[in-house]
Structure formats: structure tokens, C-alpha cells
Image (cartoon, rainbow, N blue to C red):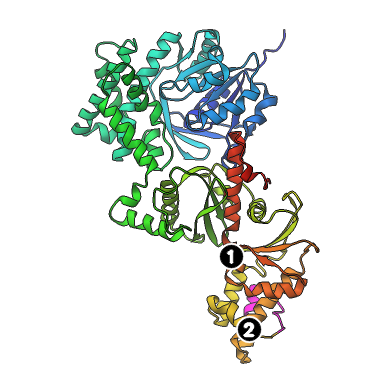
């Protein structure tokens, strides 16, 4: 007897819904692959698996985790489940069309009215299923979801009943592993979709605008009255659309909502964190269908427009008190165009690069032409997480960030950007944006020295790094200067006054400090000590490989604050080395450039401004 072939399921989007479905379908015997564009998150899942906590306690390993939908092609899936935000779905559908086969069935596992139409546009009605999800969770780690509730059953149906058998097959698999799911026809599917959306629309925007959890909102009689009126509007519109509800549906809704936990619904979480929301598919759809039938939906319209306003405007900067003041100060300090206001860049496609270096975290925002709009930095070695949140809040509130990239030492522990890349690639991309073609790049950072070699097409051909701990780096320089009693801000100008040619004999910080103290006790002038320290670093760099005959550029925080080093390196290499503009931010700038390139690739947008740099 032939062995039964496993059902193959691809899950695109590994948020709470995607995690729960992936774990349960694998338990049901399916072969499951995941697509998660965030490389840090994908690596975490590969290494540690997916973990469900609270209402569902389960852990499952996943070896097949991809960061690109195109990588799923060899898998030849039977089902593709789209469990990502509707804001990201159109681009995902475009990419997934390359996976389309005769047997493929696609499933929308998203809340809201008409979300399945995003899949229908690509794959057609006959191949599309819709899952009405009655469970929820919060992501508490890149690979961990706290399942907050499950009110069975879920509902699964074919959009036009063409693949009702597929709905039954998948519903049976989920039910067998205690995720009760009922297969229904297309008419009941429409009813269940409206039912769930009316419930979501009643609480989600209210919680986001008021900052009340579901339990807190339902505990206040004033907000309860508001919730009832929002639901009543939704029922009127649904009935005009021939959706049938029982006579006590409003009462059922209120009873259901009272079971809500002390947490924020997904839309509220997005709004609070200044991310795009799915309001257009919740209250926005109720308003849209209300207009079709000339039904006033005043409260749904109010919530739709409030959420949109809070998403599109910098509300935080207008709040009196500490939070608003902090955000205004960050914006004022980081804006390159000091004449810009909080609304200047809200309608401009922007891209964010974050360089999580060993000493500082650098932030750069660029527009769709690669022009830098905002730069900021924070010390890395601090426990002040609020400072980091304040900068991120300022950026997301004031810039229309479409895509983001993290780089640097801390990139693998940071899951808040769309992609992560190495600082080698980001440094090359940043310099290449301004200086195309073959080049050497010298990057003296807080903990290492790198020399990057780019070819004619701006690709990283090779790179070299220093081989002794932090010898000759920014941290080395700062400690030695402090021991010598030299103000780091004055060091470069002091060294320019000296002709001293000796260097430190040791690059071990401990021994170098002792040697510096001997210089001080011998009465050596501060300018000679400063130049002697620079000589040591220059000689260290000079021992590394630098290809002759091509332009050389310097980047990094050290050269930003110690420009005299360039003069010494010019002598060592007998060439005119250039310092790029804003050298401390060039790596974060390069990360933003890569984010821009990746965004246009994913959305298949032809943008000539970015074609000159491809890494």
C-alpha cells in the first residue's frame, strides 16, 4: 500500500495567528514551511522553534523558515495561508503568484471585511478560502505567542464554494488537534465574517484611541454605551447587505466582549506603536457599505477618521508634558532640514536604517530619492530602553516609513525592523550611493577596524578586519586619551600642532595605559601625546590590506571626531583619502538605502534612483 503523501502548507506571516496555525497544522501531520521576512525572527524560529503559552501550551520545531516568498517555490505547497497584515498583503500576493499551481489553494486568515479580495485579485475566487479566526494572542518574543483566548469554533469556507472539499479537509485537520474549526458554505462565511468584524470594530479602535484594554473598556459604563452604539450601526449596515443575524445578536455581542481579557486588540497595538492599522477593513468597511445603502454610520466614521488621523499625524508631539517635549526635542535635533515640520514628510515614502553599533546606536531616515532627512544617535551601553523607544516613536510618528533595516553588532537581537544586514554591506551601500565604482572603505569603529573592498558594480568583493581585540579602535582611543588627561574633543586639533613621530609600543589597553603614564611623567606635551596615540592607530591601519590605484574613503565614528587621523593615513598610504559626509551615520544611511532597494524589489517598482547601488 502506497504511503500517503503529507499535505504541504506554507504560512506567510508569522505573527500570533500564523504561529498558532503553523504549530497546530504541524501537529495534525502536515508538512509546514514558514515565510518570515525579518531575518532575526526567522533565525530565532529556526534555532528555538515556535512556542505557544497560556490558553494553548505547546512548542514545535521548524527547520524550513524562509525570508522570501520566492524561496517557497521548490516546496510546491498544497495550501498557502496568508496570516499577515492587510497593509503587507498586496505585495505578498504579487510575489506568491510565482508559486501558483493548479492544485494550490490560498487562504486568507485575516480579520476584517473583504480581506479575501486581496487574494482573489491574484488567484481568483475559485482557489481562495477564508478563515474566520476566533482565537488571538500577543507576541511576547520573536518566536513566542501568548494565546489570550480561543472561543470555538473557527469558520472556514470557499469564497464561491468551488473548493468546499478543501475547506472541509483543512477544518478537519485543525479540529483533530483541538483547534475546533467548522467548514461552512460561502453564504454562512459572509455572515460569520460580518459578525466577527462588527465585534472587532466595536472595541479595537476604541482601545487604541483611549489606551484602554478590552477588559477596562468593558468595565466602564460610558464606554459600554459607546460600544453598543457602534455595534448597532454595524448591524444596520449588515442587514442592508442581506446578512442575517438572530434577534438577540447585539446582546450576544456584548456578552462575548465581556469575556475579553486585560490586553489590547491587534489594531490597538498597531496604533499605540505608531504602525499602519487595518482600520479600512474594520470600521472603514462598515462606513463604505453604509454609504452604499445611505445609512449613517457616525460613530464608525468617527473612529475610522480618528485612527487615520492618529496614524498620519504626530499626535505625540502635540501632547503637553514630558512625552511631547521629548519627541519635539528629538525631532528638532535630528532633522536635517531645520525648516521642516512634523507633517512635512508624512506623504513622502521614507526608509529607516538603524546601526546598532558597539558604542552608539545610529538612526537615519531617507526619502525615496535617497536623500537623508533625519539623523540621530544614542549611546549603546545603557539600560535606558525608554530613550530608544522615544527615538523610534519620534521617527514612526513623523515619517511615513515604508521599510526598515537594522545592522551592526546588535542587529541579531533586534526584531523591530523588516530586515537585517551586516554592517559590511550597509557601509558599502552607504558610500556607494555617493561614490560609485571600485573603492576601498576604511571603517574605524568602537570595537574593530574594517577595510572593505568594492568592485566596479559596488558589490563587496572582500573585507579585512583587525585581529587583536579592540586594538586601535574607538574604545581604545577613548580609554588612552582619558588616562593621558586629554579632552577627546580637543585631541584632533592638539595633534595637528605636533610633529612627534613615535607611537605606543603596545596595543593592549592595559599596557598602553601604563606607557601613556610614562609619557606624562616624562613631561611630554599633550599635543605630542595626542599625535603619538594617532600614530599608533594609523600604523595599525597601515598594516592592513589596502588595494592601490583606487579611491579610498573613511567612515565611522572615530574619523567623524578625529579628522586628523586622515592626514596621518594619507602619509602612510601616500594617497588622498576622503572622509564621507556624516561618516558616523553612513552605515545606518546604507541600511536605509538597502531598505529602500528591498522595498522596491518586493513591490516591483521601477525606481531609477536606486539602480546605481545594488548590494
The number of discs equals 2
Residue at 30% from the left image edge and 51% from the top image edge? 319
Q: Which mark is residue 450?
A: none
Lower position in the chain sequence, tag 2 or tag 1: 2
Residue at 30% from the left image edge and 29% from the top image edge? 301
Judging depth in this view, the residue of 117 and 69 nearest the camera is 117
- Structural distance between the alpha carbons of marks 2 and 1: 21 Å
Residue 205 is situated, as x and y percent measured from the top left of the image, at: 33, 33
Give the SS element for disc 2. Answer: helix
Residue at 30% from the left image edge and 12% from the top image edge? 239
**Label 1 CA crowd tier, 10 Å (few <14, some 14–19, many 20+):** many
Instruction: Give the residue number, with chain letter if any, for mark 2.
Output: 529
Judging depth in this view, the residue of 192 and 584 nearest the camera is 584
| Apparent side of residue 529 relative to residue 189 in the rendered image (left or right) | right
**Closer to the eye: label 2 or 1:** 1
Is residue 599 in view?
Answer: yes
What segment is highlighted magenta in the picture?
Answer: 501-517
Q: Is residue 319 above or below residue 402?
A: below
> Image quadrant of residue 232?
top left
**Label 2 CA crowd tier, 10 Å (few <14, some 14–19, many 20+):** many
Give the SS element for disc 1. Answer: helix
Residue 27 is situated, as x and y percent measured from the top left of the image, at: 56, 23
Q: Residue furthest right?
A: 548
Residue 285 is situated, as x and y percent measured from the top left of the image, at: 37, 24
Q: Is residue 352 above or below residue 282?
A: below
Instruction: Give the residue number, with chain letter if any, for mark 1.
Output: 557
Residue 318 is situated, as x and y percent measured from the top left of the image, at: 31, 51
Amino acid at each position: 500500500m502506497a504511503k500517503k503523501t503529507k499535505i504541504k502548507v506554507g504560512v506567510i506571516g508569522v505573527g500570533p495567528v500564523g504561529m498558532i496555525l503553523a504549530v497546530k497544522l504541524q501537529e495534525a501531520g502536515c508538512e509546514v514551511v514558514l515565510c518570515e521576512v525579518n531575518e532575526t525572527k526567522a533565525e530565532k524560529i529556526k534555532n528555538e522553534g515556535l512556542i505557544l503559552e497560556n490558553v494553548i501550551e505547546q512548542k514545535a520545531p521548524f527547520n524550513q523558515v524562509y525570508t522570501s516568498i520566492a524561496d517557497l517555490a521548490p516546496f510546491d505547497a498544497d495550501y498557502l495561508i496568508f496570516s499577515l497584515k492587510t497593509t503587507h498583503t498586496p505585495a505578498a500576493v504579487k510575489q506568491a503568484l510565482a508559486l501558483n499551481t493548479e492544485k494550490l489553494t490560498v487562504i486568507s486568515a485575516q480579520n476584517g471585511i473583504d480581506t479575501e479580495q486581496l487574494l482573489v485579485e491574484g488567484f481568483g475566487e475559485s482557489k481562495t478560502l477564508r478563515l474566520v479566526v476566533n482565537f488571538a494572542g500577543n507576541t511576547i518574543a520573536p518566536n513566542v505567542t501568548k494565546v489570550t483566548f480561543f472561543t470555538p469554533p473557527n469558520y472556514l469556507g470557499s469564497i464561491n464554494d468551488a473548493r468546499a472539499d478543501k475547506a472541509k479537509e483543512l477544518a478537519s485537520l485543525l479540529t483533530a488537534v483541538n483547534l475546533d474549526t467548522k467548514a461552512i458554505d460561502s453564504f454562512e462565511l459572509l455572515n460569520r465574517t460580518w459578525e466577527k468584524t462588527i465585534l472587532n470594530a466595536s472595541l479595537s479602535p476604541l482601545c487604541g484611541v483611549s489606551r484602554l484594554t478590552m477588559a477596562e473598556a468593558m468595565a466602564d459604563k460610558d464606554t459600554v454605551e459607546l460600544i453598543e452604539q457602534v455595534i448597532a450601526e454595524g448591524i444596520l449596515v449588515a442587514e442592508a447587505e442581506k446578512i442575517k443575524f438572530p434577534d438577540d445578536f447585539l446582546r450576544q455581542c456584548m456578552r462575548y466582549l465581556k469575556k475579553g481579557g486585560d490586553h489590547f486588540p491587534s489594531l490597538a497595538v498597531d496604533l499605540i506603536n505608531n504602525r499602519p492599522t487595518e482600520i479600512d477593513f474594520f470600521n472603514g468597511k462598515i462606513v463604505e457599505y453604509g454609504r452604499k445603502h445611505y445609512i449613517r454610520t457616525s460613530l464608525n466614521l468617527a473612529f475610522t477618521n480618528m485612527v487615520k488621523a492618529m496614524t498620519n499625524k504626530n499626535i505625540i508631539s502635540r501632547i503637553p508634558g514630558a512625552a511631547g517635549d521629548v519627541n519635539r526635542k528629538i525631532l528638532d535635533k535630528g532633522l536635517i532640514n531645520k525648516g521642516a515640520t512634523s507633517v512635512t514628510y508624512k506623504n513622502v515614502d521614507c526608509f529607516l536604517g538603524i546601526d546598532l553599533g558597539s558604542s552608539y546606536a545610529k538612526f537615519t531616515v531617507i526619502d525615496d530619492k535617497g536623500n537623508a532627512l533625519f539623523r540621530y544617535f544614542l549611546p549603546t551601553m545603557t539600560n535606558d530602553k525608554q530613550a530608544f523607544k522615544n527615538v523610534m516613536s519620534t521617527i514612526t510618528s513623523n515619517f511615513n516609513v515604508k521599510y526598515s533595516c537594522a545592522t551592526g553588532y546588535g542587529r541579531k537581537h533586534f526584531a523591530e525592523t523588516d530586515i537585517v544586514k551586516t554592517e559590511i554591506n550597509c557601509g558599502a551601500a552607504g558610500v556607494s550611493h555617493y561614490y560609485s565604482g571600485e573603492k576601498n572603505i576604511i571603517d574605524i569603529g568602537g570595537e574593530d577596524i574594517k577595510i572593505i573592498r568594492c568592485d566596479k558594480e559596488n558589490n563587496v568583493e572582500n573585507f579585512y578586519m583587525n585581529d587583536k581585540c579592540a586594538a586601535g579602535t574607538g574604545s581604545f582611543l577613548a580609554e588612552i586619551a582619558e588616562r593621558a588627561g586629554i579632552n577627546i574633543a580637543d585631541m584632533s586639533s592638539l595633534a595637528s600642532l605636533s610633529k612627534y613621530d613615535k607611537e605606543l609600543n603596545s596595543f593592549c589597553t592595559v599596557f598602553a595605559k601604563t606607557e601613556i603614564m610614562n609619557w606624562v611623567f616624562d613631561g611630554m606635551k599633550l599635543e605630542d601625546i595626542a599625535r603619538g596615540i594617532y600614530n599608533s592607530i594609523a600604523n595599525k591601519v597601515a598594516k592592513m590590506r589596502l588595494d592601490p590605484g583606487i579611491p579610498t574613503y573613511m567612515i565611522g565614528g572615530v574619523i567623524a571626531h578625529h579628522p586628523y587621523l586622515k592626514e596621518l593615513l594619507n602619509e602612510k598610504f601616500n594617497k588622498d583619502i576622503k572622509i564621507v559626509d556624516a561618516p558616523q551615520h553612513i552605515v545606518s544611511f546604507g541600511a536605509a538605502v538597502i531598505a529602500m532597494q528591498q522595498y522596491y524589489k518586493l513591490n516591483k517598482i521601477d525606481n531609477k534612483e536606486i539602480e546605481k547601488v545594488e548590494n
